[in-house]
């Protein structure tokens, strides 16, 4: 990868990486750090990464970095917390989009990652597997579970509203 | 998998565009006939996330400036220009060589020494400064001149065997015959210099190793180490002193200098070269990767 191609990656992919990290970490400062670290690693390995694999490489680095930060800060949502929070609706939601964004934050990290890559970045199962280290079947089942959770969350919210 | 779970899975696959057209049409027909199922499908469609518009503000801090590699192969004229500059700059050193009348100056330092030093008779040199000479020189050197024979046959004042360096056996057997001649000259030169007291440095000759490999032996080094620069330029005409002097002059700004070469990163795709001296500090990056064709085109 040339310097020019690296700069193209920065221009086209940094927003997505930032959004991905921000959605995981829910902290703008930490998300910015993730973006910095991610592109720094791309720059160091730019001779080994070409443009076709750059996006997957960046998201993989960002994913690992985000997971590490979450583990360190102990903010990783466990399934128990998700279930608990699922039925403790205190916020008032303006529309379905806001509800669904709140629901995504309550997903376990692996489900959140796969559904973000699927819907935000348009990745297929294999590409998501490359980023997360899962098999295609694992990716598919995790997306399925995530959608089922979001669906039930929306259903519950509609009942409350 | 229950019937309900099976239906959820099929709806999920339809949302993911993984059903065939026939399967999708069949499922849509079921949805029309089942209101609860249709509500589920509508909820499931809402789980398709829409990416929010997020902009990373610090893009500029991530951007890198393009560095162009200099292809030295494309600047071959520079080599010739640099060579010309070096030759012109060192003209004061090599002009004596080309203006010299003596065409036999291409030789060992021992020959140069013999030529410029005033000749003195052997009787004046040897008794004062006795140079320890191995017996093998006279015995094995078949091409010795009469002078050489005289030197060896002179009575010795110093016979301290402990101070004489032993001659390596292979050297004696294989090389002594062909190299004894310049060595003898050097020993004579050393003796004559000290005898005249030109440089006034008293070095016990017995402590000097007199036998070394090649025409430039330790006696030569001892002699040339005390040659002043002016003496070198004015008296010692020849290729080797001129070249040595030129190299010393060229390298003088780089004395006490350090040159570090290290990989830039673990990919080892580039080297960083650091030059440090009292006067100068310079760094250079050297890419080990060939310039790609597409990069050349884009540049």
Image (cartoon, coloured by chain):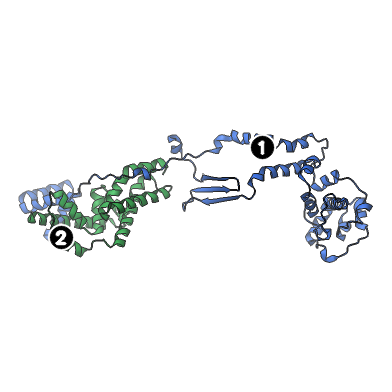
Chain colours: A green, B blue
Residue A50 seen in the current view? yes
The N terminus of chain A lies in which quarter of the figure? top left
* Crowdedness near tag 1: few (<14), some (14–19) or many (≥20) residues, C-alpha within 10 Å: few
**Whether residue B208 is situated above or below residue B17 in the rendered picture:** below
Which residue is label 2 attached to? A86
In percent of width and height, residue A138 lies at 26, 58
Q: Chain of mark 1?
A: B
Q: Please give the name of the residue rendered at 90% of the width and 50% of the height, measured from the top-left corner.
A: B145
Q: Residue at x 39, y 41 (%)?
A: A5
- What label sits on residue B229 in the rendered view? none
Looking at the image, which residue is at 36% across and 52% down? A37
Q: Residue at x 92, y 51 (%)?
A: B147
Relative placement, left or right, of B53 versus B284 is left
Q: From the top left corner, tell me how far across and down residue A63 is, in percent.
A: 31, 54
Q: Nearer the viewer, residue B144 or B82?
A: B82
Q: Is residue B46 left or right of residue B205?
A: left
The one nearer the camera, B8 or B138, is B138
Q: Secondary structure at mark 2?
A: helix
What secondary structure is found at the residue carrying circle 1? helix
Tag 1 residue? B86
Please state the chain letter of the residue tagged with numbered disc 2 in the rendered image: A
Where is residue B223? Give x, y as percent: 80, 51
Q: Is residue B36 left or right of residue B140?
A: left
Q: Is residue B74 above or below residue A135?
A: above
Asked whether the beta carbons under mark 1 and mark 2 sit within 8 Å of each other, the answer is no
Residue in front for this viewpoint, B261 or B296 = B261
Alpha carbon separation for disc pair 1 and 2:
82 Å
For label 2, the crowd category at 10 Å Cα-Cα, with few meaning under 14, some 14 to 19 and many 20 or more, is: some
Is residue A125 visible to us here? no
Quadrant containing the C terminus of chain A in the rendered view: bottom left
């Amino acid at each position: 990868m040339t310097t020019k191609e690296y700069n193209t990656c920065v221009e086209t992919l940094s927003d997505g990486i930032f959004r991905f990290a921000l959605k995981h970490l829910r902290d703008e400062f930490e998300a910015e750090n993730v973006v910095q670290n991610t592109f720094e690693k791309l720059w160091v390995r730019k001779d080994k990464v070409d443009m076709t694999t750059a996006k997957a490489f960046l998201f993989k680095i960002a994913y690992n970095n985000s997971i590490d930060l979450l583990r360190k800060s102990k903010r990783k949502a466990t399934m128990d917390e998700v279930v608990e929070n699922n039925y403790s609706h205190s916020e008032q939601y303006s529309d379905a989009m806001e509800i669904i964004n709140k629901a995504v934050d309550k997903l376990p990290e692996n489900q959140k990652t796969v559904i973000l890559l699927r819907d935000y970045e348009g990745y297929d199962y294999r590409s998501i597997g490359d980023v997360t280290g899962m098999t295609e079947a694992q990716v598919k089942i995790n997306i399925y579970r995530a959608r089922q959770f979001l669906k039930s969350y929306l259903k519950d919210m509609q009942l409350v509203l | 998998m229950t019937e309900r779970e099976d239906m959820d899975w099929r709806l999920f696959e339809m949302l993911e565009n993984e059903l065939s057209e026939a399967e999708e049409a069949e499922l849509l027909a079921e949805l029309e006939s089942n209101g609860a199922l249709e509500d589920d499908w509508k909820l499931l469609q809402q789980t398709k996330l829409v990416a929010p518009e997020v902009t990373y503000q610090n893009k500029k801090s991530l951007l890198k400036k393009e560095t162009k590699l200099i292809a030295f192969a494309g600047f071959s004229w520079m080599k010739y220009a640099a060579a010309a500059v070096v030759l012109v700059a060192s003209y004061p050193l090599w002009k004596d060589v080309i203006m010299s009348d003596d065409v036999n100056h291409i030789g060992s330092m021992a020959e140069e020494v013999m030529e410029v030093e005033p000749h003195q008779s052997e009787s004046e040199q040897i008794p004062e400064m006795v140079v320890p000479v191995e017996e093998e020189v006279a015995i094995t050197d078949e091409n010795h001149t009469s002078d050489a024979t005289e030197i060896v046959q002179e009575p010795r004042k110093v016979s301290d065997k402990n101070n004489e360096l032993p001659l390596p056996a292979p050297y004696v057997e294989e090389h002594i015959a062909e190299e004894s001649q310049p060595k003898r000259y050097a020993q004579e030169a050393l003796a004559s210099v000290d005898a005249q007291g030109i440089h006034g440095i008293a070095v016990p000759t017995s402590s000097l190793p007199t036998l070394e490999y090649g025409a430039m032996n330790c006696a030569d080094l001892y002699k040339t180490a005390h040659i002043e620069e002016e003496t070198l330029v004015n008296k010692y005409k020849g290729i080797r002193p001129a070249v040595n002097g030129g190299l010393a002059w060229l390298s003088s700004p780089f004395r006490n200098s350090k040159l570090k070469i290290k990989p830039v990163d673990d990919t080892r795709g580039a080297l960083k070269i650091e030059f440090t001296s009292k006067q100068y500090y310079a760094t250079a990056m050297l890419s080990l990767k060939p310039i790609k064709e597409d990069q050349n085109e884009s540049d």
